[in-house]
Image (cartoon, helix red, strand yellow):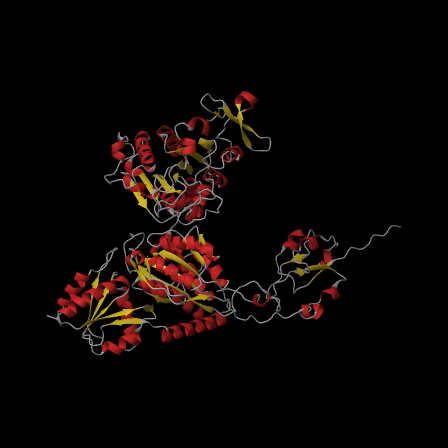
Amino acid sequence: MTSVAERPKPFVLPEYCKGCGRCISSCTKACITMGTEINPVTGLVPIVLDLSRCNGCGLCFEACPEPYGLRPQGEEAAFELVDPSTVLGPRPYAAPQPEPWPDTSVPLPEREPLIVKGTYAAAVGAVLAGCRHVFGYPITPSTEGAELMAKVLPELSGVFVQAVSEVATVNMMYGAGGAGKRCMTFTSSPGFSLMLEGISYMIGAEIPAVFVNVMRGGPGLGNIGPEQADIKLVCRGLGHGNTHAIVLAPATPQEMLDIAMLSFELAFKYRNPVVIVGDGYLGQMTGKVRLPRQMTEPGIPEWAVFGDRSHRGNLMCSLDLSEVGLEQHNVRLNEKYAQMTAEEQRADLYRCDDAEILIVACNTPAQLAKGAIKELQDKGLKVGLFRPITLWPFPIEALLTVLDRVERLVIVEASSGQLEDELRLALSHAEVHAPPPMSHVRRMGGILPSQDEIVEHVLGLEEVR
Amino acid sequence: MTDLAVPVTTRKDWASDQEVRWCPGCGDYSILSAVQLLLPELGIRRENTVFVSGIGCAARFPYYMNTYGMHSIHGRAPAIATGLAVSRPDLDVWVVTGDGDSLSIGGNHLVHALRRNVNLTILMFNNQIYGLTKGQYSPTSEVGKITKSTPFGSLDAPFNPVSLALGAEATFVARTHDLDRKHMVETFRRAHDHRGASFVEVYQNCNVFNDGAFEAINGKENRADMLIPLEHGQPIRFGADGEHGVASDGHGGLRLVEVADVGEDALVIHDERQVNPSLAFALSRLATGPHEPTPIGVFRAVERPDYGSLVDQQLLEAQNRQGVGDLASLLRSGATWNYD
């Protein structure tokens, strides 16, 4: 008499079954049905077996994609859920806590000043701040900065990569910044718009980088003339979610260099992107630039994805599926923003000591305003310039020190009032409910307000007439 | 309106009053004039014709056409044209783009317009450089190219636009060049008459930032030996007396041969209507760049329903099945409740 070895019937390990149902369609005897009970351990719904018709064909073992979902009966004991650490023992070694490698400052010899254009000055500043990774996509009027970097970086063991778009650029910066490297880009308004998605992710994942946005006429493609109409975007609209970044507005090629260096310090201090906004003129304006007496050799921060044992626990991520966790993350971001607001306000006060009329302007319009102020002071008028260097946070503290004497604020800008909006918002937050009357000189479309227009406007004010 | 005869036009009727602002000597001028020569012959109306462009030198094209036009976002022209062509199937929609616009920032949109076979005529001016931003390398620039953004030479392997379009299974793929007006006109005519997405690569000289990029193949003395004209149904041969030809290499590819060595029967017969794009692809791989004998003409022209027709058909089927939709009842169907 021949004997047939009895083939095993299946049993289900509910903790491993994800309820995918592949076994159901494989079973020729309709023994398997979709379950209705949620497994409390996994939160999933495992299948249910009814083995009354089962002939032990074994097709369901083949169909199950889980290594331990359906197993032959008799193996039950081997598949109890156990903590891997009790089987494998503790990890063979504990990774050391990552230590930051500090930045070092290298003294530089005294050098003759350079005569360079604004975008070049920013590039030089970035190199001196230790930036060796530059990404960008050609766009007028900012491309020269990147072109200079393409030329000088290889000798410094750095790299410039021309990306295929600004979207690619910002994501390359996410990568380089996430590795703890100092990286930057040069772009202009339409390109900056494309980078906003990535900037929001970088703020969420706390990745530092420096963006130089040489603002040009908009909206849309606009033109390549100078404008300041991205102020709203950089101060209030850096992509979706609860985002802010320090926004610096240089006014001269010298400041392009100084601020580029400062931006890297701030970006790494706060683990947050920093935006430098210039206007088309400033990018192209050539001026004398003094080099600093020291440069930075950057280290590696402890949070970087650096690729060694001690850094391997680091994860760059803006995702947090737990609502409570994400709220806590936002609270922490808000604390950073509050610290930036308290500590990083910067402004330049020009002839403000006895000013009755205070002009508020930044970038090249501020330079034009200085010219106008000299003219107006020759006529005996008490006019000063308040020049925010940080647009966000707005330097309201410095403004409040001179505001008492001021009878009139004149906001001069190449936009439809975006700087004025920042000023008004800052005054409102500072509980200044009755600020001096405001008027403005505005141009748009790639035109800056002229010195004559400013003079004419001030001479036409009722306080002056 | 439709039963009125299409008015007879001349080249002048298709030119706008705008001053053409390309650099003197730019290859774009001859492409513009080829298009303006062709359009009066197509029996189409200016008011039903739209030129859509993105950003770049080529993208100035719509300004110079006395038709409707959109000068749009960098790289997005194929997407914008898709929206237009699908919502207005009665229009003749042309996309004019460059190698930077369509292959770097717009690479995504281009391949999907081709894949979907949207009824567009896409003219891609390939000058292997970014001209508008004054000379940076582009996705078609050759390896080692020295430009302002690659002072030590480009490291990127360039795209072969014809191979790329064939890879996206474009139903019409052709190549022409800016020094042969007659060839351009005929190629553009074929591209226009094709239903579905037509892709034409136009080798275009940028005489300021990349002068002579195609000189080696389309210079007057070089043409006969360096351009391989593709003609449907004909053996592929070139040279002043047809002494060179193209034969199978025995490994699924093609090779250049001397007709005297292999005999005429060994030459490959061009078949642009092969549904399998392998022959067209092998032809596109004959030259690694515009310094080797390069095929020009129509690589592939096959029939496949265009996206707009498929959309229309789907709408009809849905309406036949369920009747013409009634907005009020649609709003009240599904998960909506009355509030008492």
Query: Which residue is located at x 83 percent, y 52 percent?
Result: A4
Residue A436 location, quadrant: bottom left
Closer-to-camera residue (B291/A94)? B291
**In the image, residue A423 lies at what x, y percent?**
27, 70
Number of numbered discs overlaid on the protein picture: 0
Left or right: A350 as drawn, with respect to B259 = left
Q: Is residue A178 above or below residue B212?
A: below
Residue A159 visible to an observer of this rendering: no
Q: In the orientation shown, which residue stands out farthest toward the left?
A: A465
Closer-to-camera residue (A1/B74)? B74
Left or right: A375 as drawn, with respect to A397 = left
**In the image, residue B223 lies at what x, y percent?**
42, 28
**In the image, residue A95 lies at what x, y percent?**
61, 69
Q: Quadrant of the C terminus of chain A?
A: bottom left
Residue A52 visible to an observer of this rendering: yes
Closer-to-camera residue (A172/A335)? A172
Q: Is residue A242 above or below residue B112?
A: below
Query: Which residue is located at x 30 percent, y 63 percent?
Result: A252
Query: Which residue is located at x 51 percent, y 62 percent?
Result: A179
**In the image, residue A438 lies at what x, y percent?**
20, 70
Q: Is residue A150 above or below residue B285?
A: below
Closer-to-camera residue (A4/A262)? A262
